[in-house]
Image: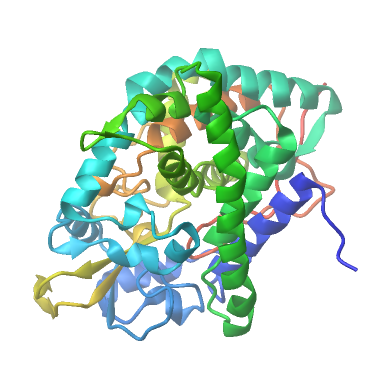
C-alpha cells in the first residue's frame, strides 16, 4: 500500500532526492579536489560531474557527446559572456520534455532575448525591493518566525527554508493561499528537476515521474489562471502582469501563461531554499562572522553574496560550442559541450584573495552563482530579497546555535548543493 505523505514531508523527500542525485559519489567537501583541477588542468577533457556519478549539466541524457570541463573564473566568465558562440539549448535536454520544452534557460539568440524582455519586468530589482515590506517580510515573520520563536528550536530546513520562499514567491505569482496547492506545486517542480539521474535504474523512475509531475503542474495551474482572469482584477503580481503584457504584438492566452508560469516554478523556490540553508550553515560554523553581521545589519546583503560565492547552490552550468573555439590554447571543436564548474571559479585565487575564507567585507567581483551575461538568473533579485529578510529574522533569535542533540549539518553535492537538515536552538 502506498502511503501518501503530508505535503511538507513530500517536499522534504523530493528535496532529498535531488540532493542525493546531485551528490553522486563526490566528496561532501569538493573544494580541495576542485582546487587541484583548477591549478593542474583548468581545461579538462571529460565531465567532472560524470566522473563523480553526478547528472551532467552538459549531457543530461548521457548521449556521449564530447565534453570539456572548465575550472577558472576567467574562462567561465568568458563563456557566459559569449552566448552566440557558447549556446544554451542543451540545458533543455534533462527535463525540458516534462515542460513541453518551454525553458527560458534553454533558449538562444533572438528567441531568448524576446522572451526575456517580455517576462523580466516583474522580476527587476526596483519592483522586487517594493515587495520586501508588503509581502516578503510579512510572510517570513507572520507565517513562520513568529510561530517558531516560542519553541526555542527548529530544523531550519524543514520548518523554514523549504516552505518560506515558496509561500512568498507563489503569493507574488498571484496564486490562492492554499497550503496544499502550494506544497503540491513545489513538490512537482522539484520532481521535474530531479529527473536527470546518473543511476540508469533510478532514472527509469525519475524521468517518467517528472513527466507526470510536469503535466500535473499544468493541469493544476490552468484553472488557477482561468479563475484569475475571470475575476477581472489585474493586481500587481506576475499573473496580472502577464495577462496585460504583449509578446511580439500578441496577448498571452491562458494556456501560454500556464506554460510560462510552470517554467518559472522550476526555479522559484528550491534554489532559494538551498542558498539560504547553505548561508546559515556557513554562518553558524563561523560564529564570529554571525556576530559581526548581527551587530551590523548593513552587512546582511554582503553575507548573502559572500556565502553564495563561497558555497553556491548551482555548482555547474552547461554550454555547447556553436563553432570551433579555443580556450587557453586548446581547441574546442564545434558541438563540444563545456561544463562550467562555478564552484571552482568562485574560489579562484586569481580573482578572490584567501578564497576559502568567509569574509563579509571582501572586495567583490561579478558573482557567477546566478550565472552571468544574458542568461543571468531572472529571479535573482527575488531570491536575494527573500534571503536577506530571512537572515535579518534569524539574527533576532537570541544565541542562535547548532543543536548538539543532532549531527552537525554538512553541505553536500557537486551541484545543487545543500544540507539535509539544520537543527538549531535559540534562547527564549
When asked about the image quadrant of residue 175, the answer is top right
Q: Residue at x 29, y 38 (%)?
A: 364
Q: Is residue 128 left or right of residue 389?
A: left
Q: Is residue 359 visible?
A: no
Which of the 4 image quadrants contains residue 102? Answer: bottom left
The residue that appears at 44% across and 19% down in the rendered structure is: 298
Task: Decide: is 233 above or below 402.
Answer: above
Q: Nearer the viewer, residue 272 or 173?
A: 173
Q: Quadrant of residue 230 in the image?
A: top right
Q: Quadrant of the C terminus?
A: top right
Which residue: 67% across, 27% down?
177
Q: Pick out the residue farthest to the right.
A: 1
Q: How is the image coloured?
A: rainbow
Rendering coords of residue 334 (x, y %): 14, 77
Number of numbered tags placed on the structure image: 0
Q: Give the percent coordinates (x, y) of residue 307.
A: 46, 42
- With 94 as the anchor, is 200 left or right in this view? right
- Percent coordinates x, y for residue 355 in the rendering: 36, 51
Q: Tell me, yes or no, if residue 310 can be seen here.
A: yes
Q: Nearer the viewer, residue 97 or 284?
A: 97
Residue reaching furthest front?
230
Residue 391 is situated, as x and y percent measured from the top left of the image, at 57, 28
| Relative horizontal placement of residue 220, taking residue 42 as reference (left or right) | right
Up/down of 28 relative to 216, above or below? below
User: Is residue 397 shown above or below 3?
Assistant: above
Quadrant of the image containing the N terminus? bottom right
Q: Nearer the viewer, residue 298 or 188?
A: 188
Amino acid at each position: 500500500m502506498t502511503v501518501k505523505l503530508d505535503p511538507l514531508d513530500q517536499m522534504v523527500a523530493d528535496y532529498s532526492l535531488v540532493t542525493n542525485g546531485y551528490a553522486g559519489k563526490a566528496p561532501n567537501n569538493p573544494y580541495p579536489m576542485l582546487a587541484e583541477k583548477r591549478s593542474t588542468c583548468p581545461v579538462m577533457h571529460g565531465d567532472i560531474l560524470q566522473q563523480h556519478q553526478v547528472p551532467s549539466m552538459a549531457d543530461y541524457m548521457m548521449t556521449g557527446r564530447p565534453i570539456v570541463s572548465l575550472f577558472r573564473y576567467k574562462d567561465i566568465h568568458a563563456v557566459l559572456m559569449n552566448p552566440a558562440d557558447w549556446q544554451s539549448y542543451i540545458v533543455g535536454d534533462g527535463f525540458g520534455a516534462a515542460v513541453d520544452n518551454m525553458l527560458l534557460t534553454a533558449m538562444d539568440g533572438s528567441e531568448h532575448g524576446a522572451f526575456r524582455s517580455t517576462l523580466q519586468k516583474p522580476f527587476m530589482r526596483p519592483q522586487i525591493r517594493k515587495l520586501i515590506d508588503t509581502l516578503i517580510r510579512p510572510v517570513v515573520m507572520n507565517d513562520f518566525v513568529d510561530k517558531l520563536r516560542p519553541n526555542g528550536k527548529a530544523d531550519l530546513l524543514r520548518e523554514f527554508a523549504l516552505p518560506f520562499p515558496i509561500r512568498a514567491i507563489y503569493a507574488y505569482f498571484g496564486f490562492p493561499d492554499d497550503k496544499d496547492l502550494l506544497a503540491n506545486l513545489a513538490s512537482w517542480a522539484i520532481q521535474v528537476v530531479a529527473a536527470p539521474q546518473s543511476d540508469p535504474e533510478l532514472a527509469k523512475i525519475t524521468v517518467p515521474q517528472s513527466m507526470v509531475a510536469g503535466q500535473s503542474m499544468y493541469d493544476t495551474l490552468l484553472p488557477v489562471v482561468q479563475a484569475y482572469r475571470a475575476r477581472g482584477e489585474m493586481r500587481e503580481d506576475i499573473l496580472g502582469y502577464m495577462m496585460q503584457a504583449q509578446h511580439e504584438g500578441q496577448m498571452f492566452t491562458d494556456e501560454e501563461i500556464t506554460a510560462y508560469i510552470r517554467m518559472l516554478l522550476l526555479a522559484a523556490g528550491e534554489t532559494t531554499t538551498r542558498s539560504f540553508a547553505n548561508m546559515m550553515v556557513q554562518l553558524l560554523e563561523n560564529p564570529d562572522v554571525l556576530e559581526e553581521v548581527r551587530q551590523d545589519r548593513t552587512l546582511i546583503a554582503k553575507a548573502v553574496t559572500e556565502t553564495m560565492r563561497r558555497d553556491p547552490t548551482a555548482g555547474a552550468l552547461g554550454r555547447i560550442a556553436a563553432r570551433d573555439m579555443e580556450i587557453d590554447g586548446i581547441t574546442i571543436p564545434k558541438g563540444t559541450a563545456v561544463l562550467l564548474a562555478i564552484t571552482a571559479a568562485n574560489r579562484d585565487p586569481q580573482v578572490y584573495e584567501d578564497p576559502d575564507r568567509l569574509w563579509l567585507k571582501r572586495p567583490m567581483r561579478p558573482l557567477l552563482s546566478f550565472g552571468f551575461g544574458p542568461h543571468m538568473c531572472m529571479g535573482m533579485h527575488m531570491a536575494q530579497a527573500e534571503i536577506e529578510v530571512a537572515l535579518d529574522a534569524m539574527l533576532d533569535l537570541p544565541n542562535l546555535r547548532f543543536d548538539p542533540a543532532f549531527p552537525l549539518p554538512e553541505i553536500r553535492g557537486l551541484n545543487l548543493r545543500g544540507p539535509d537538515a539544520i537543527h538549531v536552538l535559540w534562547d527564549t
